[in-house]
Amino acid sequence: MGRGQWEKSDRLRELRAAAESFLESPCTLSPFQTRAILGELCSDLGYCLTPHDFETIEANPPTDPLSFAELVMNMEGGGVDDESLEPVLERVLRTFQGAARR
């Protein structure tokens, strides 16, 4: 494994560790926050959900960033792998951290 792969692996490990804190202290995103992060994932990363899937997540968003990221990725049909997960989890985690600070 090259240096770049190790750095990516370390970054994903850091993101997962930060996301795990929400397992002990779940956080429910508001409908506005949910729409905003789903829009960002679509426009920035191409994870564009069907209107039905969008509404499903908006009505009952997962309360931790890792579950949220994995759900979006699975609903979009691409599955979840470490390389794809990192940018999605990074954005979702940022949204959850902002919501938890309020």
Image (cartoon, rainbow, N blue to C red):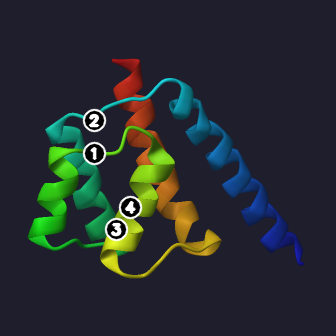
Q: Which of marks 1 and 3 is nearer the N terminus?
A: 3
Write down the residue under mark 2. 29
Q: Quadrant of the N terminus?
A: bottom right
- Label 1 and label 3: CA atoms lie apart by 20 Å
Q: In which quarter of the image is residue 5?
A: bottom right
Q: Which label belongs to residue 24?
A: none
Q: Earlier in the sequence, mark 2 or mark 1?
A: 2
Write down the residue under mark 1. 61
Q: Which of marks 2 and 4 is nearer the N terminus?
A: 2
Give the residue drawn at x 80%, y 72%: 4
Task: Name the mark nearer the viewer: 3 or 4.
Answer: 4
What x and y, as percent, mark residue 28?
31, 32
Please report contact status of discs 1 and 3: CB closer than 8 Å, yes or no. no
Q: Looking at this rendering, what residue extends furthest in the top direction?
A: 102
Q: Quadrant of residue 8?
A: bottom right
Q: From the viewer's perspective, is 29 left or right of 55?
A: right
- Label 4 and label 1: CA atoms lie apart by 9 Å
Name the residue type under label 2. Leu
Q: Looking at this rendering, what residue extends furthest in the bottom direction?
A: 78
Could you tell me which secondary element the residue under label 3 belongs to?
A: helix
Q: From the viewer's perspective, is 70 left or right of 46?
A: right
Write down the residue under mark 4. 71
Q: Quadrant of residue 46?
A: bottom left
Give the vertical position of 57 relative to 31 (above or below): below
Q: Quadrant of the C terminus?
A: top left
Name the residue type under label 4. Leu
Residue 35 appears in the rendering: no
Q: From the viewer's perspective, is 24 left or right of 8?
A: left
Q: Which of 75 and 95 is in front in this view?
A: 75
Name the residue type under label 1. Pro
- Label 2 and label 1: CA atoms lie apart by 7 Å
Please report contact status of discs 2 and 1: CB closer than 8 Å, yes or no. yes
